[in-house]
Image (spheres, coloured by chain):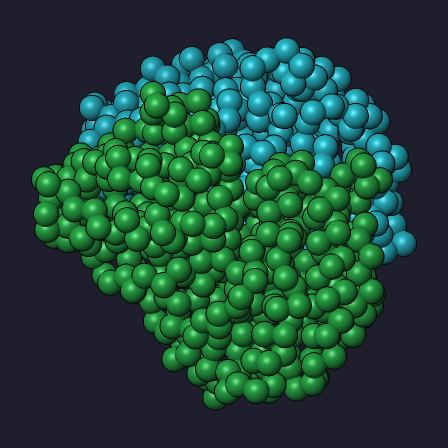
Chain colours: A cyan, B green
C-alpha cells in the first residue's frame, strides 16, 4: 500500500459575492474531485490549529508530523535547502527577492518585473562577494524560481535575530536591518546584511543581464533584498519516524526545502513554474511514474498555482486552475489502486484577503478499506459534513500511516 | 445522577466488501442501540489521538482521564493488578502465556490449545519456584483467563528494560530475553527471566493437569512464556480526581488491572469469558444490580467479545456478538433513569486488519438534559454526523462529569 498527500497550495477560500457567495472551489466544475469525495471520507483540516494562519512552510511542517512551533526557525533555511544549498547547523539563511531600485535607492519593483531568466548569471557574480570587514564570513547566494533567491551566511558568531531588509511596499528604500535581541551576534549579522544589500547593487547594477533588461524596458534585477532569517534546525528523518521510503514532488524551493530537511528524496521536474501557467502534465506524469515504478511508498505532492492566484486576488485564474488540476491531474490519480490518496490544501488563500487566512481547508481520504460518508462534492463547506469531522495537520500522517497499516499499536 | 461508560472492546471496524462495504456495526441489526442514538447525542472518538493505534490498556487509561504517555509502563503491571496480585512500586510485572513446547523446546502452540481449566493447579506448583542464583527474588505467578497468566518479580535491583520471551510465531523456541539498555539491573532481570522460563518447563511438564491433557490429545500447558515487562506505576485515584465512588465491571484481567490502579472497586463476575461465548446475562444483571443497589455512582464497563472476533477476522461472529449485546444488554440499559449512559468502544479491531487500528470509534451519550441530534442509528459513519463531532478519549470523563453535574467551574 502506498500513500499520497496531494496538497493544492492555498486552495481554500471564503465565499465571494461574484460567485454567488460560493468559494472558487465550490463554484468550480470538478467532476473528478467530486467522485473522489463520494468514494472517500471527507473533513476539514486546520494545518496548525483553528484560526491560526499558516505559512506554506509551517503548514507542510505540521502536515508532515513535525511541530512547527519547535522546528520552524524562519523561512530562509527551508528555502535554501529547497534550492539545493547544503546548509549546515549554525548557518543563517534568508529568502531574497531580486528587486529593482532607482538611482536614489528607492525600490520601484520588489520582484524586478517578475524576472524569469538570467538570475543564475547574476548569482554567479554575487557569489564572488567578500566583505572587507568580515573576510571570514562565507556568503552563498543561490537563485530560486522567478525573482526569488536565497542567501546563506556561514561563519562564527552569527544570529537569526535580525529584521528584514524587505520594505514590503514599493516606493521605499530597503529597510535597514537591525538586531532584534540586542546581542553582539545579531548586531554583527545585521551589519553584514546591510553591507550585502548595498554591495549587491554595486556588483550587479551593470550586469549584462540587467543592461539587456533595461534596453528591453524591463525592470533590472539590480539589488538583492533579504528577509526571513532563520538558523538551520535539526529534525528526525521522516523515513525513520514513520518507517516509509518517502519522496517529494513539488514545484517550489520552499516545499522542496522542507521535504529535504525531513530527509525525503526530491523528485526533479522540468517545465513547472509554481504558477497557474505550470505544466500539469509534467506533474501528473511524474506522480504516476513514481507511484508505479519507484520504491517510494509515501509521497508529498504540492501544486502551487491556486495559491498564486489567491495572492493575486484573481478569482477567474484560481477557479480555472482548480478545474485544470481536476481535469489533468485528478482524472488520472483518483483511480490509482493500492493507494491511500489524501487530497487537501495547506491553507486558504482567499481572493478577498490576497494572502493566507486561518480558515480550515477541505480534505478527502480515499483508498481500500477507508470508511465512506455521504459527501458527494469536494468543497470547504461539503467537506465539513463528512466523516472525518475536523482534524489538525499534525493528525494527517498518523491517520495515513494507520490506513496504510504501516503503524504500530501503542499498548496491547 | 449516576454515570456509565460502556465500552464494547474493539467494536469499531472498516467497510467490508462482504457486507456491501458496511462495517459489522453498520450491518448489524441493533434496534436498542439505534434507539439510544436517536435519543442521545452522537460523535466519533479517538481514544488517544487521530490515527494513533491504541491498545485496550492505553485506550482505557486515556478514557479514564489519565495520560497514557505518562502512565503506561507496559502491559504487565495492569494485567497483574487485574488478576489480583497486589503489586507494589518496584515490582516488575509480565504478561505470560501458558504454551506448549515439544521435547526439543520448540513452541508448538503459543496458547496451549487455549486451555481453559487447570491453570490454577499449575500455578500452585509454579509459585514454589526459587532460583538458586537469586534466592532473594520473589517469583509470583497468577493465572488469568484461559491460557493467560501473569508473573511478578519482586526484589532489589530489577528493571523492566528487558525483551520478550514470546517468539510470536510457532515453530520457534522461546526467545532468549536480553537487556534493552545494557544496565546491570536489566542484565540481572533478563537472566532471571530466562531461568524462570526454563525452570517452568521442568516443574510442570509432568503436572497431572498436563498428563491428562496429553492423554486427551490436548496440547499441555508445559511452559510459561513472559512478555510485556513493566514497572509498577503510581496514579492519582479516580475517586479523588473526579469525586466519584467508582466501580469496574469487566471480563478481563487487563481492564480490571487498569481500574484497580485507578483505585476503582472491581465487581467480580462468574461465567464470563472475555470471548463471544461470554454470558451476557451475567454482565447485564451485574450492571443493573450495581446501578440500582450499590453506592457506586460511576461505572466503567467492558465487554470484550467484539475484539476477540475482530482479532480472529471472523465477521459473522463480530456482527452476531454486537447483535447479542444489543438484545441482551442494551435492551435493559437504555431506559435506566437518572443515569448518563455512554456507549462506545476503546478502539477499532477491523476484520480486515485482525488487529487494532487507529480508526475512530462511535459514541452515544444519553441521559437527562443531554442535547440530542439527528442521528438515528449507531454506527461509525452515522455517529460522525452527530452533535458531539470528534472528541478524544481524554475528554470523556470531563464530559461525563459535567453532564452528571459533578464537576467544578474553572474560574469564576
- Residue A180 placement, left or right of A410: left
Image x and y of residue B180, in percent? 25, 35
Q: How many marks?
A: 0
Tell me if residue B214 can be seen. yes
Pick the residue in front: A162 or A251: A251
Is residue A380 depicted above or below A326 in this figure? below
Pick the residue in front: B159 or A352: B159
Choose top left, top right, bottom left or bottom right for residue A77. top left
Q: Residue at the spot x=81%, y=41% of the render?
A: B19
Image x and y of residue B378, in percent? 76, 60
- Residue B149 placement, left or right of B138: right
Tell me if residue B396 can be seen. no
Q: Residue at the spot x=78%, y=28% of the render?
A: A334
Image x and y of residue B26, in percent? 79, 52
Image x and y of residue B206, in percent? 33, 37
Choose top left, top right, bottom left or bottom right for residue A358. bottom right
- Residue B280 placement, left or right of B218: right
Pick the residue in front: B391 or A265: B391
State the quadrant of the N terminus of chain B: bottom right
Q: Residue at the spot x=79%, y=32% of the render?
A: A321
Pick the residue in front: B199 or A286: B199
Amino acid at each position: 500500500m502506498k500513500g499520497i498527500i496531494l496538497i493544492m497550495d492555498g486552495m481554500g477560500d471564503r465565499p465571494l459575492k461574484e460567485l454567488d457567495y460560493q468559494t472558487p472551489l465550490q463554484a468550480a466544475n470538478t467532476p473528478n474531485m467530486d467522485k473522489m469525495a463520494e468514494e472517500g471520507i471527507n473533513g476539514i483540516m486546520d494545518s496548525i490549529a483553528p484560526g491560526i494562519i499558516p505559512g506554506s512552510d509551517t503548514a507542510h511542517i505540521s502536515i508532515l508530523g513535525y511541530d512547527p512551533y519547535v522546528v520552524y526557525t524562519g523561512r530562509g533555511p527551508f528555502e535554501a535547502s529547497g534550492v539545493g544549498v547544503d546548509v549546515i547547523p549554525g548557518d543563517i539563511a534568508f529568502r531574497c527577492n531580486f528587486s529593482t531600485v532607482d538611482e536614489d535607492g528607492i525600490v520601484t519593483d520588489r520582484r524586478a518585473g517578475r524576472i524569469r531568466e538570467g538570475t543564475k548569471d547574476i548569482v554567479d557574480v554575487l557569489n564572488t562577494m567578500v566583505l572587507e570587514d568580515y573576510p571570514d564570513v562565507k556568503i552563498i547566494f543561490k537563485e530560486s524560481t522567478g525573482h526569488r533567491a536565497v542567501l546563506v551566511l556561514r561563519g562564527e558568531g552569527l544570529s537569526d535575530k535580525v529584521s528584514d531588509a524587505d520594505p514590503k511596499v514599493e516606493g521605499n528604500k530597503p529597510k535597514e536591518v537591525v538586531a532584534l535581541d540586542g546581542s553582539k551576534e545579531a548586531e554583527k549579522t545585521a551589519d553584514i546584511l546591510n553591507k550585502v544589500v548595498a554591495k549587491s547593487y554595486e556588483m550587479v547594477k551593470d550586469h549584462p543581464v540587467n543592461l539587456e533588461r533595461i534596453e528591453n524596458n524591463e525592470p533590472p534585477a539590480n539589488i538583492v533584498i533579504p528577509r526571513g532569517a532563520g538558523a538551520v534546525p535539526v529534525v528526525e528523518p521522516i523515513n525513520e519516524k514513520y518507517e516509509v521510503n518517502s519522496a517529494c514532488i513539488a514545484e517550489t524551493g520552499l516545499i522542496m526545502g522542507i521535504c529535504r530537511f525531513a530527509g525525503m528524496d526530491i523528485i526533479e521536474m522540468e517545465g513547472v513554474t509554481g504558477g497557474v501557467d505550470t505544466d500539469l502534465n509534467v506533474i501528473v506524469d511524474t506522480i504516476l511514474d513514481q507511484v508505479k515504478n519507484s520504491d517510494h511508498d509515501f509521497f508529498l505532492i504540492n501544486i502551487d498555482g491556486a495559491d498564486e492566484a489567491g495572492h493575486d486576488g484573481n478569482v477567474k485564474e484560481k477557479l480555472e486552475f482548480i478545474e485544470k488540476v481536476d481535469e489533468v491531474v485528478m482524472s488520472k490519480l483518483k483511480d490509482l489502486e493500492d493507494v491511500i490518496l489524501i487530497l487537501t490544501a495547506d491553507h486558504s488563500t482567499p481572493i478577498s484577503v490576497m494572502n493566507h487566512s486561518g480558515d480550515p481547508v477541505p480534505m478527502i481520504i480515499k483508498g481500500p478499506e477507508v470508511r465512506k460518508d455521504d459527501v458527494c462534492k469536494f468543497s470547504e463547506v461539503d467537506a465539513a459534513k463528512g466523516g472525518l469531522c475536523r482534524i489538525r495537520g499534525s493528525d494527517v500522517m498518523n491517520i495515513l500511516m494507520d490506513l496504510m497499516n504501516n503503524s504500530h499499536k501503542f499498548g496491547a
